[in-house]
Every structure is written in structure tokens, then in C-alpha cells.
Image (spheres, rainbow, N blue to C red):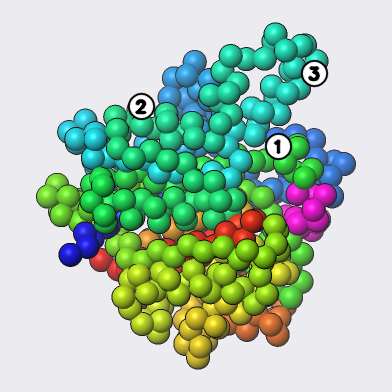
Amino acid sequence: MKRRVVVTGVGAVTPIGHGKINFWNAIKEGKCGIDYVTRFDASEYTCKIAAEVKDFDVTQYIDKKEAKRMDRYTHYAIAACMMAIEDAKINMKELNGERVGVILGSGVGGIETLEDQHNTMLSKGPGRVSPFFIPMMISNMAAGHIAIMTGAKGVNETIVSACASGTNAIGDAFRAIRNGDVDVVITGGAEAPITSLSFAGFCSMKAMSTRNEDPKCACSPFDAERDGFVMGEGAGILILEELEHARSRGAEIIAEVVGYGSTDDAYHITAPAPNGEGGARAMKLAIEDAGIAPDEVDYINAHGTSTPYNDKYETAAIKTVFGEHAYKLAVSSTKSMTGHLLGAAGAVEAIISALALKDNYIPATINYKNPDAECDLDYVINQGRNKEIKYALSNSLGFGGHNATILLKKY
């Protein structure tokens, strides 16, 4: 018999709020975290807006000296991890560390450190590059620091699958517990990509919104006038536990993870496959993994990037998988509020999906004004709704054709 896997704690560092309660309240309020870029001078960029993390002081979580030896993405991961552990009311020191794992996702890891140290080398010479450069930059280091901090000696991995990274990480964590490799996994994703170089790259690709005159409305998934994604940053961490392990310590269970699907388009480095066929296969696999019928799914937290192709093809993929039921289930893109956290997006959206199940609340897709004939599902437009839901599905799709879907169930 397969072991059951549950979510017992969540932590979030996001552009709209930190910690489970503040973050979830902001989602329910339809708060938007997008504004003008402050991390660098974006005056010469075609996109001048982003969803930056605000009111965040890493020294509330770790020593100032230690923090200087970590990239910003690691700061976010550690803070969200500490919040999740507190939320789960789990004492890591009382656990068998060999039965605790860490599986995180990050698309670009320490890119801010990479840029800073490259500038140092060009201006001051190679001898001035920091000895901490490599362990600050590499994408696995957030997972490494969390293991050291918590004593987690089990499986430790970092998944890099672009914008699917966070969801792939949760899916792998789910499987590791279900297969009996570990009893607890700290999982999710972290990203701090708002830097001058990464912004320049995405601007050159013409992937980001240029609605600079109205930042709060710039991200409008499924709207006919959508013109590109808005970059975000932050971290989402979930504590996954084997069900009996959680019960034995009297844990409050937020939701159950019941299915996972992962595929690739094998089509194009950046464009999704026509009609989202790879995403459709990921959804089908997750539903089959859970052993349920497609019409049992009540809510989809869509990848919903507010780009012309993604939203059209993800809508088509949902229709492929669900048929007529596609018009009966609720779909929303919470990136309209948080921006696109790249490798951390799936983790933050998994938290939203779990809390939606727990709270019987479906969050909105804000900023929707203009209907698109090719995007004709129930996108929970501009106002969230109170509704009991039993199954929630969360999609993440990434450059390279990566598709990942997790399926959660009300506990």
C-alpha cells in the first residue's frame, strides 16, 4: 500500500506578504505586488516593473555575518523554511535526521552574486573575487544551508527545470515520502532574479510586459490585451510528511498531496507546444497518479503567465484533459498578484492551492478586463469566491518544454 503524504506547514516570502497568514490574506484581498523596479536603474529597459519582495529583513532569521555569505535567493529560502517549520510545529531536533530530506527548486540560483562578482573581477581583477562566490552562487546552496540548519541528512536535491522547478521539487518530495525513502521533506522553491542582466535578457526576448504606465494592472492573465509576464521574486516552502508520522505528533494537516505528473514538450526552447499538449499530458499523469476521474477536480491554479501563447495553450490543454468539465471547474492565475517567481512560482502556487482547499476559497485572477475568444473558461475574474473544493491541481510550465503538475486533496 502506498504511503500517504500530507502538507503540515507552509512558509512564504513574497511580493504581497510574508508568512502563511499575511500571504493568504493578501491573496484573498486581491493585493497586487507589482511596482517600479528599485533593485537597479531600469530607466533604459523596455520593462521597468517587477514584483519585488518588500519589508524583508534577513537578520530576523539568520546572523548578519552569515547572511553576507549567502545570495538573496538563499535568504528567502531560509526565511520561508523557518516559517514553515514554525507553522508545522515540528521540532527538527527530535526527528531522525536521516529520515528528513530537502528538495528545492530554483531556476537561476544566485544570479545576483554572479553579476556582482563578475563586475568586481572586471573592475578590480581576479584576486578580488570573493572566496564565497561559488558557494553563494550555485543553485543547490539554499538546500545545503537548510540541511545544515535543520539537521536533515536524507535526500537533498535541487531541481532546475526553469519555471517548473518548484513544482517538480514538490513532486519529487511527494514521491520520496510515498516510496518510503524519508518521512519528512522540506520542499518548495526560491528565486531572486530581479537583476540588471536577467532583466536585460528577458527584455531582449520580448517576454515581459511593457505596460510601465500602470504597474498594478500590467499582469493580466487570460485577458485579450495581455502582453507578457512580470518578473517576481521570493520563496515558498512546504513541510511534507508521511500521514502516520504527522498524526503521531498531532500535526494539523493543511492538505494531502495525491498526484504528480511531469513531462516535456520536446518542441522548442521557449515556446510551448501547440495546444499545450505537453502540459495536458502532465495533468493527465497527475490525475491518473491520484486514481481519480478528471471531473472530480474542482480548481486549477494555472501557470497563467499573462503571455499570449502560454495562456491560450494552457486553456487548450485544460480542455483536452477535462472536456466539457473544463467549463465547470474554476481556473485562476495568482501570478496576477504575485508576479512570476520563475523557479519559485510552483512552490508559492502549491501553497495557495493547499490553503484554498483548507479554507474553501478560490482566489481570483485580478486585472481581467477584455475577454479573449480563445480563453473562455471560468477564470474567477477579479473577485475570489467562497466555495468548498475537494481537489485542486497546480500547473507549472518552463522554458525547455518542462511541464509539471501536482494534485492536492482536501484532508
Apparent side of residue 141 relative to residue 173 in the rendered image (left or right): right
Q: Nearer the viewer, residue 393 or 59?
A: 393
For marks 2 and 1, give the CA distance. Answer: 28 Å
Position in image of residue 399 (x %, y %):
65, 56
* Among numbered discs 2 and 1, the one appearing first in the sequence: 2
Circle 2 sits in a helix, a strand or a loop, which is it?
helix
Amino acid identity at mark 2: Ile
Q: Nearer the viewer, mark 1 or mark 3?
A: 3
**Magenta range:** 202-218
Task: Look at 61% across and 66% down and name the residue there.
Answer: 265
Amino acid identity at mark 3: Leu
Circle 1 sits in a helix, a strand or a loop, which is it?
loop
Position in image of residue 196 (x %, y %):
75, 37
Question: Which numbered disc covers residue 148?
Answer: 2
Task: Look at 52% across and 64% down and name the residue there.
Answer: 263
Query: Label 1, on which residue?
Result: 195
Query: Label 3, on which residue?
Result: 122
Circle 2/circle 1 CB separation < 8 Å: no
